[in-house]
Amino acid sequence: MEISANKTWNQFVVKKGNKSLVLDMIKEYAPLSRADIAQRTGLNKGTVSSLVNELLEEQLISESGPGESSGGRRPVMLLFNHIAGYSIGIDLGVNYILGVLTDLQGNIQHEKKIYYKRISYQESLTQLFEMINHLISVAPPSPYGIIGIAVGVPGTVSNSGEVLLAPNLGWKNVHLKTILERKFRLPITIENEANAGGYGEKKFGAGKDYNNLVYVSAGIGIGVGLILNEKLYKGRNGFSGELGHMTIQAEGRECRCGNRGCWELYASEQALLLEADKAGIQPSKADGWTLEDLIEEAENGNEEIIRLFEKTGDYLGIGLNNIINIFNPEQIIIGNRMALSEEWLMKTLEQRMVSHTLWFQHKDLHIDFAELSTYSTALGVSALSVERFLSVDVSKKILNN
Ligand SMILES: [Zn+2]
């Protein structure tokens, strides 16, 4: 009995594996004919044909008109049905929420962003719920509807979706996954925003061609997402990447994490705004400086402010040197809000790196700014949700019609 049960289980696993393989092929290389798939995967034509039929029934792929053929009847081509469902990706920032509704290929169908100053835990939950409800309401009709909601959070997230600590949000032990599951009854993914951003850049942005990359999310704080050997590296419990809290100044400023001299206190958006305050440079608006104002001033040639950016770039370089020496990556991507000021950071950042990185670490190292700009996290987290949806056996997926 046991043997036959095992055999069935193995057949099931193999079939599921083959089906994912066929779907991945179509996702990646469509339009493809059944014969193309058989050739590329090495599966026999009968197997391909039956898996393709299942995928057609599940509406995850579609057939298009005939494609190119070298003589004879032209084969029917298969396409990935990227609008079989929609995914919601949220970047929950400290002073903003960005929400996107994407199709299954990561194309943005709809987006919304709201800004706010410091708000309470309850208020931020309310904003989050409103954002999700809004994105659900604008989703076009589709076979699977909303396939999942995913949120990138600037803090440490456990594998079970609990936000253990998000110092800049003021959150501690918030079981966000459970809260959203109860409210929306949909698959929920919670991820650290830098992990999500790194994944987004690897999948759609500046990191497409690299297998070992470090994504530095420099916003109000700093988080780091690690893609090692093509995979998002999360550590044993999902806590990797807290490099914003590495010490770069012994006896330095006090951090909300309880430590002193953390990198993010010197090289982030909050550091820059603090420096502007400390230097006594008067903001033109009553409610203080914003990063956008400072960039505008730098563009207008304000030397004092350009120097603040250069100082911040230098501190960014100090932390990057440490990271490079630990991971020996192929690429470093600087993303999130501070990437908006690339022009003003790059000079001192590069100077610091050239002068302090061990010479052999420099070889073939690429330093880039995020291509998806401020969308890296929202798109990355949305893509994680899509991947999860497509990897679940279809019997567990629920067709709307
Ligand atoms: Zn800290």
Image: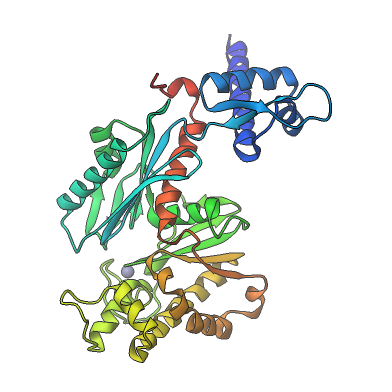
Q: Is residue 260 visible?
A: no
Residue 254: image x %, image y %? 26, 76
Identified at 56% across, 27% down, the residue is 61
**Which quadrant: the C terminus?**
top left
169 vs 57: above or below = below
322 vs 91: above or below = below
The quadrant where residue 63 appears: top right
Furthest residue in direction top, as rendered = 1
Judge left or right: residue 5 versus residue 178: right
Judge left or right: residue 210 versus residue 371: right
Front position in the image: 75 or 164:
75
**Which quadrant: the N terminus?**
top right
Residue 313: image x %, image y %? 44, 80
Residue 15: image x %, image y %? 62, 22
Furthest residue in direction bottom, as rendered = 303
Furthest residue in direction right, as rendered = 71
Identified at 57% across, 19% down, the residue is 54
59 vs 167: above or below = above
The quadrant where residue 11 appears: top right
Identified at 75% across, 22% down, the residue is 44
Please state the quadrant of the image where ligand 1 appears.
Answer: bottom left
Front position in the image: 348 or 248:
348
Q: Is residue 272 visible?
A: yes
